[in-house]
Image (cartoon, rainbow, N blue to C red):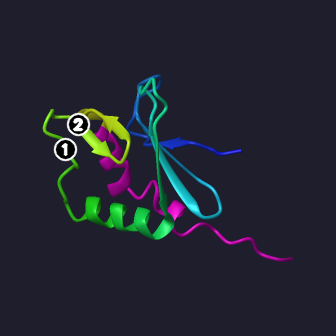
Amino acid sequence: MLEWQKSSYCGQGESCVHVAADDATVLLTESADPSGAVHRMDRAEFGDLLADIKAGAPAPTAPDGTVRLGPVTTTTDRWHTFERGVRAGEFDHVVDPPHATGA
């Protein structure tokens, strides 16, 4: 079962960008999207997204002012909340997950 994570900067009960990962794929969704759209990418692509955000790349803003990443649409405020979490390193573990250690 996937464990979805949102930025700690997203308030309790607020709609936010959420991230989850399985063995090979990272998934992003917007909790307020009634369609349930999910953007899938591999860990390297997600790592590139995080690096771009940390380097100050602009949000992928559509002509209508919404932020779009693949099929996922969110508001600029929600995207900026996600960016704050990215800059704080809250999603770094998704790119380089902890490895199981044998005892």
Up-down relation of residue 30 to residue 34 (above or below): below
Amino acid type assigned to the residue bearing label 2 in the image: Thr
Q: Are marks 1 and 2 in contact (CB under 8 Å)?
A: yes
- In the rendered image, residue 93, in percent from the top left (x then y), is placed at 53, 62
Amino acid type assigned to the residue bearing label 1 in the image: Thr
> Which quadrant holds residue 80?
top left
Side of 6 where 102 appears, left or right: right
The Cα atoms of the two marked residues, 1 and 2, are separated by 8 Å
Q: Residue at x 59, y 66 (%)?
A: 97
Residue for badge 1? 61
> Which quadrant holds residue 98?
bottom right
Side of 22 where 26 appears, left or right: left
- In the rendered image, residue 16, in percent from the top left (x then y), is placed at 40, 33
Q: Residue at x 71, y 44 (%)?
A: 1
Q: Residue at x 47, y 22 (%)?
A: 13
Residue for badge 2? 76
Looking at the rendered structure, the secondary structure element under dot 1 is loop
Dot 1 or dot 2, earlier in sequence = 1
Quadrant (top left, top right, bottom left, bottom right) of the C terminus: bottom right
Q: Which residues are magenta?
A: 79-103
- Give the number of callouts: 2
- In the rendered image, residue 4, in percent from the top left (x then y), is placed at 57, 42
Magenta stretch: includes residue 63: no
